Image (cartoon, rainbow, N blue to C red):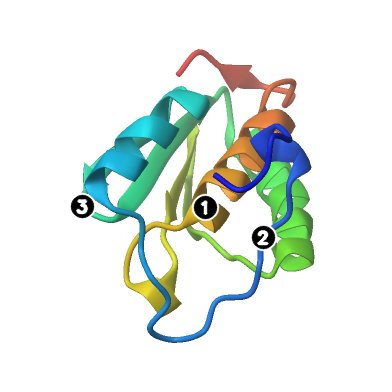
Amino acid sequence: MPSDLPLAERHCVPCRPGADALLPDEIAARLPLVPGWTQAEPGRLHRTYRFCDFAGGLALLNRIGVVADEEDHHPDVLLAWGRLEFTLWTHAANGLTDNDFILAAKIDLLAANAPGRRGD
């Protein structure tokens, strides 16, 4: 990783089509930096947050949407009653890049004290 800053303090960098995706050993080295995120399928990060209602998930999603726009890196999202799910990958690389881990860390930071959130 090119920076010693914590992931949540870093910023995503623009990727062009054909950008290099992280290799499996690079992904394995980064996964411990975003606890709770899994590689549900190759080249994709996934996490589910649980809520006591629909409104809590929606409120968090709106906050994350602002950050995703600022970083110009947009997750796939599923919002349902009681849960908010994210899937991250870099389309230009057709796999994972540092941008995905940066956004995952930023999402975790926002989710840490989200009202109505239940244990994952």
Query: Is 51 located above or below residue 88 in the figure?
Result: above
Numbered badge on residue 98: 1
Kind of residue at disc 2 = Cys
Kind of residue at disc 1 = Asp
Query: Is 109 located above or below residue 12 in the figure?
Result: above
Task: Please tell me which residue is depicted at 68% across the width and 22% down the height of the picture.
Answer: 112
Numbered badge on residue 42: 3
Numbered badge on residue 12: 2
How many marks are shown on the rendered structure?
3
Task: Please tell me which residue is depicted at 27% across the width and 40% down the height of the picture.
Answer: 25
- Taking the view exactly as shown, the residue that stands out farthest to the bottom is 17
Q: CA distance from mark 1 to mark 3?
A: 15 Å
Give the secondary structure at mark 2: loop
Q: Residues within 10 Å of mark 2 (few under 14, many from 20)?
A: some
Query: Is 120 located above or below residue 21 in the figure?
Result: above
> Would you say residue 94 is visible in this rendering?
yes
Earlier in the chain: of badge 2 and badge 1, it is 2
Q: Choose mark 1 or mark 3, whichever is in front.
A: 1
Q: Residues within 10 Å of mark 1 (few under 14, many from 20)?
A: many
Earlier in the chain: of badge 1 and badge 3, it is 3
* Camera-side residue of 39 and 20: 20
Mark 3–mark 2 contact, CB under 8 Å? Answer: no
Mark 1–mark 3 contact, CB under 8 Å? Answer: no
Give the secondary structure at mark 3: loop
